[in-house]
Image (tube, grey):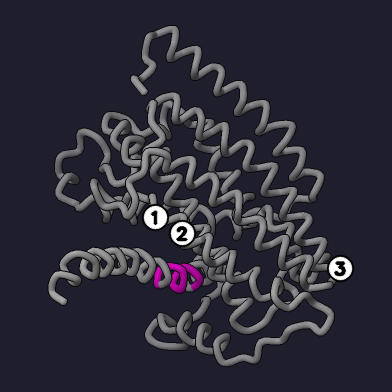
């Protein structure tokens, strides 16, 4: 028995504990991101926001979760029931498994694979399937239109995200996320690659269906879009998946452009702050930008959304990739892959 525990059980227990150490703070962060969003929007709109449940309204996310958990799940009679229930679970699951390759600090990563960027890109590409499944299985024209919109939108902006990532990889010479962070010790990539940083952030808004690109959920014309037929916990899983994807895209933005866990260069008094705290602060900053954009910009029309993705971002990011590669070759700055 002791030999069994030493050989098999303890490594498995350690892996489970590492997974829980990622998932539990992530779920708490998702819950309180909803609270932060309502407070930030309240401040932008010159109103109070949630302030009743608990001190300063801090227990509001728990009350909302309890309310959703105790509601009755309603499955439309004409729906494809298995796919209808699988769709939110798939969306939520994909939002969690992507965190396996995210480094929180030096050596703090669940799976330090050399193709971490490729893994993240693949997982984010799969996210559209949950929304398409929900739109089709609901047997509702509004949900179906929302699913079609989301598919076209996510495919369109994944192209520009891919080209932005290629620009970063040219500067690093590695697809390992820890190597990308270490390459920013002298200067964060948000400075030399500022246009790509802006393109990546705007594409992240579209990729996560956030305002001003929340067309798959357009309340004014689709009454909620792909999740219009969902209630109770299936709806909550879609909700949790969307906010977990927001945190994931903020983490990717931090790793690719804001130096991940690294403090600002040449500021010695800041070096005592742990790297994981820096990483969390940068994620919080990018999330605040997500919320700020929601409170200040109106929703795009669908033709404007497609025009921005295909006629502006695609050629611009492609040209920037060529210019970056030319600059690195001309000045013999290409890193050893």
The majority secondary structure of the magenta stretch comes to helix
Foreground: 285 or 79?
79
Mark 3 surroundings within 10 Å by alpha-carbon count, few (fewer than 14), some (14 through 19), many (20 or more):
some
Residue indicated by mark 2: 97
* Horizontal and vertical percent position of residue 203: 60, 44
Q: Pointers 3 and 2 in contact (CB under 8 A)?
A: no
Q: Position of residue 324 (x, y in %)?
A: 49, 19
Q: Is residue 220 visible?
A: no
How would you rate the neighbour count of disc 2 (Cα within 10 Å): few for under 14, some for 14-19, many for 20 or more? few
Residue 218 in percent (x, y) is at 75, 63
Tell me if residue 280 can be seen.
yes
Secondary structure beneath label 1: helix
> Quick one: SS at disc 3?
helix
In this view, the mark in front (3 or 2): 2
Residue under circle 1?
100
Tell me where the magenta segment starts and ends, as one range: 28-34
Q: Earlier in the sequence, mark 3 or mark 2?
A: 2
Q: Secondary structure at mark 2?
A: helix
């Amino acid at each position: 028995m002791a030999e069994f525990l030493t050989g098999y059980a303890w490594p498995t227990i350690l892996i489970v504990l590492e997974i829980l150490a990622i998932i539990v703070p992530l779920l708490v962060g998702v819950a309180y991101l909803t609270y932060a969003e309502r407070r930030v929007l309240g401040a932008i709109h010159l109103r109070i926001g949630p302030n009743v449940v608990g001190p300063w309204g801090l227990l509001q996310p728990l009350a909302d979760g309890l309310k959703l958990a105790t509601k009755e799940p309603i499955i439309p009679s004409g729906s494809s029931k298995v796919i209808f229930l699988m769709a939110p679970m798939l969306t939520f699951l994909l939002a969690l498994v992507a965190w396996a390759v995210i480094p929180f600090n030096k050596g703090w990563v669940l799976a330090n694979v050399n193709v971490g960027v490729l893994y993240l890109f693949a997982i984010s590409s799969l996210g559209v399937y949950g929304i398409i499944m929900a739109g089709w299985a609901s047997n509702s024209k509004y949900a179906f239109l929302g699913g079609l919109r989301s598919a076209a939108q996510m495919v369109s902006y994944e192209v520009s995200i891919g080209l932005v990532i290629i620009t970063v990889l040219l500067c690093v010479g590695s697809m390992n996320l820890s190597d990308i962070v270490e390459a920013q010790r002298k200067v964060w990539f948000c400075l030399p690659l500022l246009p790509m940083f802006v393109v990546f952030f705007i594409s992240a808004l579209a990729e996560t269906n956030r305002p001003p690109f929340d067309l798959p959920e357009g309340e004014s014309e689709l009454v909620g879009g792909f999740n219009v037929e969902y209630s109770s916990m299936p709806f909550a899983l879609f909700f949790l998946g969307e906010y977990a994807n927001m945190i994931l895209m903020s983490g990717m933005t931090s790793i690719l452009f804001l130096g991940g866990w690294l403090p600002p260069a040449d500021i010695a008094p800041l070096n005592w702050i742990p790297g994981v705290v820096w990483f969390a602060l940068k994620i919080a900053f990018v999330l605040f930008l997500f919320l700020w954009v929601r409170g200040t910009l109106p929703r795009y029309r669908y033709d404007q959304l497609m025009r921005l993705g295909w006629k502006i971002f695609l050629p611009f990011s492609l040209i920037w990739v060529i210019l970056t590669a030319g600059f690195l070759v001309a000045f013999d700055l290409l890193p050893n892959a």
